Image (tube, grey):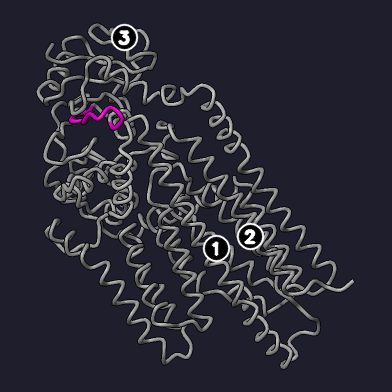
Amino acid sequence: MSSPSRAQTDRYRRRLERLCWFGALVLGLLQAWGRRHASAEGLRYIGADSISYLDLGDAYARGDWAHAINAMWSPCYSWLLGLTLRIFKPTPDQEFTAARLLNFAIYAAALAAFAFCLRTLLRTRQTRATAAQDAATETHAHTHTVALLPDCALLLIGYTCFIWTALAMNRVARISPDLLVSVWVYLAAGLLLRARAGASSWLNSALLGLVLGVGYLTKTIMFPLAFVWLACAVFAIKPRRHGAPRVVVALLVFLSVAVPFIVVLSLHQHRLTIGDSARLNYAWYVNRITPFTHWQGEPAGSGAPAHPTRQIFTAPNVYEFATPVAGTYPPWYDPTYWYTGVTPHFNLRQQAHAIARNLYLLARFIATRIFLLALLLSLAMLFYFSQRGRMLVGDVTTLWIISLPSLIACCLYLLINVEARYLAPFFTLIVLSLFAGVHLPETVAARRLTRMTVALILLACALSLAPDTARDVYATTRDVFTKQSATEDVQWQIASELQRLGVRPGAQVAIIGDAMYAAWPRLARVRVVAELPVKPEGNVAAFWAADEARKQQIIAAFAHTGAQVIVAEDAPQGVATDGWQRIGRTDHYIYFLNR
């Protein structure tokens, strides 16, 4: 039987790619739609960051530049949110749906960017592998014929990694800019691969600069990473004499996009800055300065707060923050304001502890994910049976141009704080570069091994995503018949009950409990101006355990902040709740002030 022609192989690959696209889009849409009303599942879906990005989107949409410019949250994702909400004008109970459908559009863009990167890799790797094979033959480095993984195998592995990292590490349903970052990461990698393959046109260089510039506007870490990609471009472009001028073009385009926002941000902060997120995260995660709200200058040596949230009661601690910062929850809308005066500093012991903690968290994450374990096992088997000896180093580093920037990005996060969503696109590129460098003997056993590893990876991905996907299918099917999804969400129940009880949009409220991760204030369009937080440990319990006279003193302190109501989470059983009214069927209570 004759082997299939190149044209037949290409047609089969295109069909396989269309199937991968279909699966990726269906799974992404299911997650976005199945979670469209979910607003109380912690950082997976709606967190404090999500509310701040939505608030910033509103500020940009109404042209409120004084409150829109923010050194903590990069603007690009907020621009998209603001534009989406302005165009579709969703009701409060449909706002999260609109945001998740925007996320699905971003997910589709990330899929297209990844496809561009993968196609470029497939077009270029065979040429380089052939050249390396010829060189090895001339030096008698091996005595048997070797070949790269088939395009179809690499395509399946690549798309599987993309789907898993986008759905399990990033999550389409999470309202955050991390998926948008992956768009620029994949585009930058693809443009670098094109440059390395000889397509080092002026347009390609300009596009690289544009992608890196918009990447910085999406997340601050992309600013230092841009220079890593540009440095790689110097070595990627051949001949070398063409590299420098084209990289200069990319640099100029990058700066033309990034510098205007840096100027505006620096004027707003009254000092030169590209953004303060890294600075504050270093203080919180490395120096162990009080995170993430209500810093009052502790511990000693952490600096002197210029304008902290105002403590209006002690034991339990109560804070007020009605002015001057805007937003649903001002302490997290612009933490750079409340942390003005903090002094992040390098301490070798603290830095070593942070790195060790992050390595442990990363190792635990990998060890508890069957898909990641399947990838590691597959790579180990393929490299072991490749029998490449010292040439294995060259195989692993063949695509250093996309793996090196990704490794540097991971190391930057390891220095401060590691979360799976940060690493998702970089992890995909590292895995893709490793599998693309595998060389196996051209034997029947090697082909069987390839098929087995691909099957293992696909099975592990399916098993890993199955529980959440089943849940999304159930939620979507349930909504078709009941149309009650929004009202079943606790956060939306609280918001709708507040409206029924007469708390109007724009009202000022105080909270006893965890205001930072509450979605109901945004849904009810109210503004939190004071809180009795859950930290330090026992702070909320101290309020409920206090005698009636002390409780009334605290309530009076809340009343002086301008709040019209107090909303409390989960009053302990057995405590007196005179004057408090339960909010619907939830575990929250409301107390009306000045009635």
Q: Secondary structure at mark 1?
A: helix
Residue 115 is labelled as: 1
For marks 3 and 2 on the same chain, the one whose residue lies earlier in the sequence:
2
Q: Amino acid at mark 2?
A: Glu
Examine the rendering and report whether any part of residue 375 can be seen: yes
Residue 344 lies in the magenta-colored region = no
Is there a contact, CB below 8 Å, between mark 1 and mark 2? Answer: yes
Question: Split into 4 quadrants, where in the image is the C terminus?
Answer: top left
Residue 286 in the image: x percent, y percent? Answer: 34, 52
| 300 relative to 38, above or below | below
Question: Split into 4 quadrants, where in the image is the N terminus?
Answer: bottom right
Q: Secondary structure at mark 2?
A: helix
Q: Secondary structure at mark 3?
A: loop
| 224 relative to 333, above or below | below
Q: Amino acid at mark 1?
A: Ala
What separation in Å lies between label 1 and label 2 (alpha carbons)? 9 Å
**Residue at the image point whose x is 26% and y is 16% from the top:** 590
Is there a contact, CB below 8 Å, between mark 1 and mark 3? Answer: no
Q: Nearer the viewer, residue 420 or 304?
A: 420
Q: Amino acid at mark 3?
A: Val
**Residue at the image point whose x is 16% and y is 60% from the top:** 264
From the image, tell me which residue sits under label 2.
17
Examine the rendering and report whether any part of residue 357 can be seen: no
What separation in Å lies between label 3 and label 2 (alpha carbons)? 61 Å
For marks 1 and 3 on the same chain, the one whose residue lies earlier in the sequence:
1
- The span picked out in magenta is 522-531
For marks 1 and 2 on the same chain, the one whose residue lies earlier in the sequence:
2
Is there a contact, CB below 8 Å, between mark 3 and mark 2? Answer: no
Q: Nearer the viewer, residue 294 or 40?
A: 40
What separation in Å lies between label 1 and label 3 (alpha carbons)? 59 Å
**Furthest residue in direction right, as rendered:** 1
From the image, tell me which residue sits under label 3.
575
